[in-house]
Image (cartoon, helix red, strand yellow):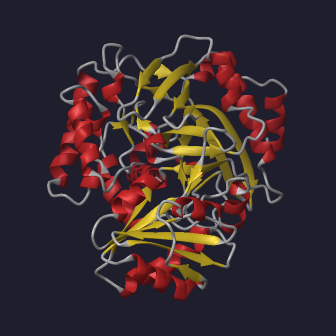
Amino acid sequence: MNLSTILAAVKEGYTCSDKDLFPSFFFRIMHNMTNTQVHTTLSIPEILLPSTNQDLSKWAVIACDQYTQDREYWKKTAEIVGDSPSTLSMILPEVYLEDSGRDEKLAAIRKNMNTYLANNVFAEAIKGFIYLERKTTYGRKRNGLMVTIDLDSYEWKPGSKALIRATEATIQDRIPPRMEIRRGAPLEIPHIMLLVNDPKKTLIEAIGSVVRVKKPLYDTPLMHNAGSITGWSVSTTEEISQVQKALAVIAEKNTAEDGSCFLFAVGDGNHSLATAKAVWEEFRDSHQKEAAEGLIDLENHSARFALVELVNLFDEGLTFEPIHRVVFGTTAKESAQFLAAKLGGTIDFNCNLNEIEKIVASSTSTCFGFIDSTGCCILKSPHPALAVSRLQPALDDFLTQNAELRIDYIHGAEEVFRLGKEKNTVSILLPPVEKDSFFSTIDTGGPLPRKSFSMGEASEKRFYLECRKLF
């Protein structure tokens, strides 16, 4: 049976039987492309949530790759949590990645996971998707759908025609350290967000209108005044079938003439997803003998899948924010002059610090703002290309020629201005990113340079809440 036949059957009313609803798979599209079988699988997860007597406002903490230069944020987070059960006990904030005692921290993470599993911190697993609504302090509301995806359907390498593709360059050196955290961990706690190209809002928003009449699974404010989050189960045969049909139509619309289908794009957590894939492939390859003897089912093994949040690219609550740069060991003048020589354009040393964000965001040319403890300047480049696609290679040259320099990637303009005040540090403010042609840009040109964009401000990122068993 080919892809078109399956899609047509789904649109005509195909539904899974009750028997098929709650194993690993409920929907698989399969087709041939240059004699290679390609498939996508959206799997119905068994999601673990804290039991009703747990304080979700202390349980849920922000993604580990946020506030990487703000130890005070994470110190205050630990103070808020105290001794309460929390996802903070099961993650390693990246602000601490280079600290000593890494092995001990990873051992403690696994111990905490096993303790939570053994001591009934979690309620009974929910078999189904979760539709969620995330409200932020910026007055925005984002809709999401928690699902599991088949890691064999994802590929981060440039030129990939996989159904799930990376949107930014993947740094291979960042995968092994993260594998240490996931390898052997009994649980996964995801901050991965995948984008779906659904301008008519037939998938996430549509199922949300159906399940919102039910009592929520959870409803909690988020720490540090980050807004709130509410989730509803998507678990009945009718609800699952609605998701299934909508996804079939989206898949058909995103299938190219060569037969390839670009179904999901990684919005956040690409390195985490790449890590999950690497750990799965390592596990799969090392258990071939057991699989051949029927001792293990690799086809349906939980490690083959990853729990993610699907978000519609066209969700009004989803804003694309630039990821700004901060370089330690230099000045605004020095870095701006180097980049001007590389990129061309002119430097304005007479800009107003209070106006720089507005100027960078509204300029018709590619514009970058440089902020340090002595003031600021603006580089205006005549090239209309995506700003970060030109900036990052030039910055890489700057760092290569000045080995003593160090770079980090910053979410949110507030953090840019805070760090820019520090001595011998320059923050580089980037302009906004357009999302209208996002999927087509990735499809034709491949992944963007690393750290090209952020979905929302730092406080709007995913908070860890849902968990899933891995082993």
| Image-quadrant location for residue 418 | bottom left
Q: Position of residue 72 (x, y in %)?
A: 24, 47
Determine the image quadrant of residue 158.
Answer: bottom right
> For residue 427, which quarter of the picture?
bottom left
Q: Residue at x 65, y 51 (%)?
A: 163
Report the number of discs: 0
Q: Is residue 10 left or right of residue 426?
A: right
Q: Viewed as shown, does residue 54 lie left or right of 352? A: left
Residue 468, x across and y down, in percent: 41, 32
Instruction: Judge from the rendering whether residue 13 lies leftward or rightward of residue 129; answer left or right.
Output: right
Q: Nearer the viewer, residue 241 or 411?
A: 411
Q: Quadrant of the C terminus?
A: top left
Q: Can residue 222 be seen from the camera position used here?
A: yes
**In this rendering, is residue 467 above or below 168?**
above
Is 262 in front, or is 284?
A: 262
* Position of residue 208 measured from the top left corner of the image (x, y, whole percent): 65, 23
Q: Residue at x 15, y 58 (%)?
A: 100
Residue 281 makes an appearance in the image? no
Q: Quadrant of the N terminus?
A: top right
Residue visible at 61% across and 38% down? 317
> In this orientation, which residue lies closer to the viewer: 297 or 206?
206
